[in-house]
């Protein structure tokens, strides 16, 4: 028995990083999984790996900033697997600039992908999740959506938006059995942080030391939390925030 038997999940930004680890974990727990990403080669690779190891996975080209792209992705998910139960809004980009260093273009790019992308995915997925009789939406925010900082102004604003958009979704759709929760990872070792927070030994040590547990997170640390929120084990959770940060925001 898998924890996601008979469920169909769509994971944005699932070609690599945390989304790809979640896709593998979900498939191993019995879900049929669609990964949508702008990275075609890496997406096809993840799709093949999952299908070769006994899972069921479909890769789709998805640009989360485009409503028609979401519309097509949701339709293709239902065409292939018959329904949609779980949406993981995971796609995102990280930018480190502070307030005065942030150009208007940079602000718009970050908000388009990280905040508008979550809105559009939620909007397009809800009619199908409703048809499935309810389901679970998991929005990947960040510790940067909980606390301020001297850098990453646009990123923090976008992740803060995800936090409250999630609660609004949760309240609006609770009566229909559609749950929505946000996830707030600390620094995680993925391709996103490889060129910045994990770029060299000094950066890696600084990043690790920010977490009371003395290390950065691995994608699996977050994926297990996302799995819990996707499964019926979390059926009494909605509008909540799952913080997976090695104690970073407890200080
Ligand atoms: P990642 O390895 O960069 O994976 C994110 C994926 O989303 C990439 O494949 C990326 O492609 C894709 N993407 C970007 N723009 C897209 C778009 N418009 N449409 C569809 N896909 C798009 O990052 P990750 O570390 O796994 O992060 C996953 C999520 O966790 C993000 O929302 C991130 O903000 C959040 N998060 C990460 C950390 C961390 O420390 N890693 C901490 C807290 C929260 P490109 O390469 O083209 O950008």
Image (cartoon, rainbow, N blue to C red):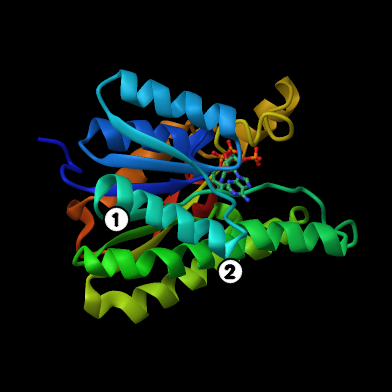
Residue at disc 1, secondary structure:
loop
Badge 2: residue crowd in 10 Å (few <14, some 14–19, many ≥20): some
Q: Quadrant of the N terminus?
A: top left
Badge 1: residue crowd in 10 Å (few <14, some 14–19, many ≥20): many
In the drawing, does residue 6 fall left or right of residue 247? left
> Which residue is under mark 1?
84
Q: Is residue 144 above or below residue 58?
A: below
Q: Say whether disc 1 or disc 2 marks the residue closer to the N-terminus.
A: 1
From this view, report whether residue 199 is shown above or below residue 165. Answer: above
Q: Position of residue 189 (x, y in %)?
A: 56, 30
- The structure residue drawn at horizontal position 42% and vertical position 29%, both measured from the top left corner, is 47
Residue at 57% from the left image edge and 60% from the top image edge: 117
Total numbered labels? 2
Q: Quadrant of residue 87?
A: bottom left
Residue 186: where, in percent of width, then height?
A: 54, 44
State the residue at coordinates (59%, 51%): 63
Asked if one can make out residue 9 in the rendered structure from this viewpoint, the answer is yes
* Extreme-front residue of the structure: 79
For the residue labelled by badge 2, is the local secondary structure a helix, a strand or a loop? Answer: helix
- The picture quadrant where one finds residue 206 is top right
- Label 2 within 8 A of ligand 1 by Cβ: no
Q: Nearer the viewer, residue 165 or 10?
A: 10
Image coordinates of residue 110 in percent, x first then y, are: 71, 57
Rendered residue at 34%/45% (across/down): 225
Residue 182 in the image: state x and y as whole percent.
Answer: 43, 59
Residue farthest to the left, as pictured: 1
Residue with the mark numbered 2: 161
């Amino acid at each position: 028995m898998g924890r996601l038997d008979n469920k169909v999940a769509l994971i944005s930004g699932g070609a690599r990083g945390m989304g790809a680890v979640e896709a593998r974990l979900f498939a191993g727990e019995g879900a049929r999984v669609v990964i949508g990403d702008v990275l075609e080669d890496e997406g096809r690779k993840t799709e093949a790996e999952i299908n070769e190891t006994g899972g069921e996975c479909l890769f789709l080209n998805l640009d989360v900033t485009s409503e028609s792209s979401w519309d097509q992705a949701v339709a293709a998910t239902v065409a292939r697997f018959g329904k949609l139960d779980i949406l993981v809004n995971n796609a995102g980009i990280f930018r480190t600039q502070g307030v005065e260093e942030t150009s208007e273009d940079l602000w718009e790019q970050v908000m388009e992908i990280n905040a508008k992308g979550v809105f559009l995915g939620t909007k397009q997925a809800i009619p199908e999740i409703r048809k499935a009789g309810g389901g679970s939406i998991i929005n990947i925010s960040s510790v940067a959506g909980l606390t301020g900082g001297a850098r990453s102004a646009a990123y923090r604003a976008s992740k803060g938006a995800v936090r409250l958009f999630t609660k609004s979704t949760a309240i609006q759709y609770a009566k229909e059995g559609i749950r929505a929760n946000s996830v707030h990872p600390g620094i995680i070792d993925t391709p996103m942080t490889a060129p910045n927070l994990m770029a060299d030994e000094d950066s890696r040590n600084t990043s690790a030391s920010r977490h009371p547990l003395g290390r950065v997170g691995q994608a699996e640390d977050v994926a297990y939390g996302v799995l819990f929120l996707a499964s019926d084990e979390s059926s009494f959770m909605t509008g909540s925030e799952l913080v997976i940060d090695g104690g970073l925001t407890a200080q």
